[in-house]
Amino acid sequence: MEKLGRWVVCAGWPYVNDRPHLGTFTQLLSADVYARYLRLKGEDVVMVSGSDEHGTPIEVEAIKLGIPPRQLTNKYHKLIVHLLKIFQIDFDNYTRTESRVHKQFVRDFYLRVEKNGYVYSQKITQLYCLNDKRFLPDRFVEGECPHCHNLSARGDQCDNCGRILDPKDLINPRCALDHETPVQRESEHWFFDLPKLSEPLRKYIETNPNFPENARNFSLGWIRDGLKPRSLTRDNAWGIPAPFKGAKGKTIYVWMEAVLGYVSATKEWAEKKKQPSLWKKYWFDPRSRNVHFIGKDNIPFHVVIFPGLLLATMENYDLPWEVSSSEYIQLEGQKFSRSRKVGVWMDEAVELEGPEYWRYALISLRPEQKDTNFTWEEFERKINTELNDVVGNFVHRTISFIQTYYKGKVPKYSTTNKQHAKILASLSHSLPNVDERLGHFRLKDALEQVVELAREGNRYLNEHEPWRLYKTDTLAAGETLGVSIQIVATLGILLQPFLPSTSKKICLSLMGKVSLPWKSAGQTIVKPGARIRHLQPLFHKVKAEKLRAGLEEIRSRALVETEA
């Protein structure tokens, strides 16, 4: 990949009405892998995300619990920050939508968009609860879905059939707080005039060669069908106060403010560095790139609405350069559901197995082309037959043989010996193979290339059998191990974006350093006579039935604690 300058690596913001599950966490992890890769290449990178904490789901839940919304979001924001540290998700700024910088940025941003003629107001009919004396947007309403007739549909979406809804769509609507039947009343609201930007957005999407086909086709279809104005305001208290004249008591709709967090988080990062104008180099310089790791359900917001908002400022923002949208992760054939407790949440995951096991499993199962069905049996297969038996086994065998037969010193080897030509060719191709895939956001394929190099290393050891050869020809056995340790070194380098702790252990064992230069992967960098430090086995095997039972135990324990 050519050096392109500055990068803002953006991960979709987790909504903090609960802990992140495997699917949400995969987006954060994907951003981390890519940002680590760019840094290893010498690129200038800022990685940002944050806790999305406004909106009606959190406000409704807080009211039901009898606590302020901020108390609820504080709890989950603190937990996510803790989990990010455990899993080594290395953000330059992981912030929150309640931050002072974000709230002020959003208000200033929309005043500019309004000044440019892209915001208008109109009166609309909404549901109103006479008992609570409040309008009922989104999750404040429950009722019967008009499509699948699920009786527990909510005012913004039906969890059963997945349809997006308006509160007035519901059959027999009721207030989510007191279950009273609401009435209809008029309320003035503000809208973003997205249709005005249809043509520049169409050109942008058609001419951006980096977008994956699913994102491009979906977004162009949206434009062909006719873009609709997007609601900017809500009648609820928990959120950023709308800055428009006459909008007292209104807040900015959560979807329309959280998407601006990528910019505000970069701005906040610059302020923390005592360089308050630095953020502009990352968002206004044509040599800068912003890339986004999201779920496919967020494609419209990142390919159409977010670029539309940036265009509406008329300030020459850099528009998204790439939107890497992953498909869905299901749990044993079922869609993740908080209400039905279908899924694996990351605080549970880390109790079941170590962070590197999850980093490996989630990237190797990353749904890049189609939905992925996560099962404990597949997790077991990934860890046992790939991570442990291929990568861990090859590294451990090579280092152990050198420790045992050559007193921990790398034996002499030759790079010109024909019997090593095939494996050395595989070694030299490993870096460009991984570079090519990471450069095209194919993280899963890139990790598979690293595992394949270890697999070839195992085949090479099995073919030459240095443990047998040592008895008759110590020099020839040494040659095999001398070449093998070069593969171990390259594995240590190429694993850096994916498994940072594992990589660090390998690099310390071989070279006494916590990391090695990315560009040295594929080369013979461990010299004859170098002392190799002892390295414990990197991984252990797991059992699906034990993991499944462990999850049940964690949840039963949590239930007892809740009841207590």
Image (spheres, grey):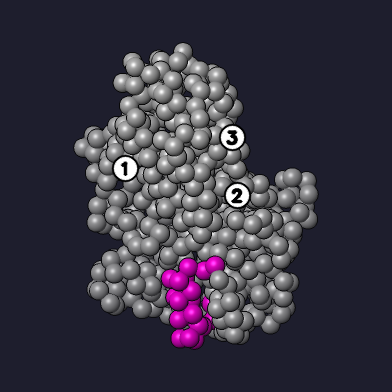
Is 219 one of the magenta-colored residues?
Answer: yes
Give the camera-side residue of 254 and 318: 318
N-terminal label among 3 and 1? 1
Residue 285 in the image: x percent, y percent?
73, 63
Q: Which residue corresponds to mark 3? A: 516
Q: What residue span does the magenta drawing correspond to?
A: 210-230
Is 75 one of the magenta-colored residues?
Answer: no
Q: Is residue 564 left or right of residue 316?
A: left
- Cα separation, mark 2 vs mark 3, equals 15 Å
Indicate the amino acid at tag 3: Leu
Quarter holding the C terminus is top left
N-terminal label among 2 and 3? 2
Residue 470 versus residue 250 in the image, above or below: above
- Cα separation, mark 3 vs mark 1, equals 26 Å
Residue 406 in the image: x percent, y percent?
45, 15
Indicate the amino acid at tag 1: Lys
Q: In this view, does 471 lie to the left or right of 482?
A: left
Q: Which residue corresponds to mark 1? A: 382
User: Are there few (<14), some (14-19), or many (20+) residues within 10 Å of tag 2?
Assistant: many
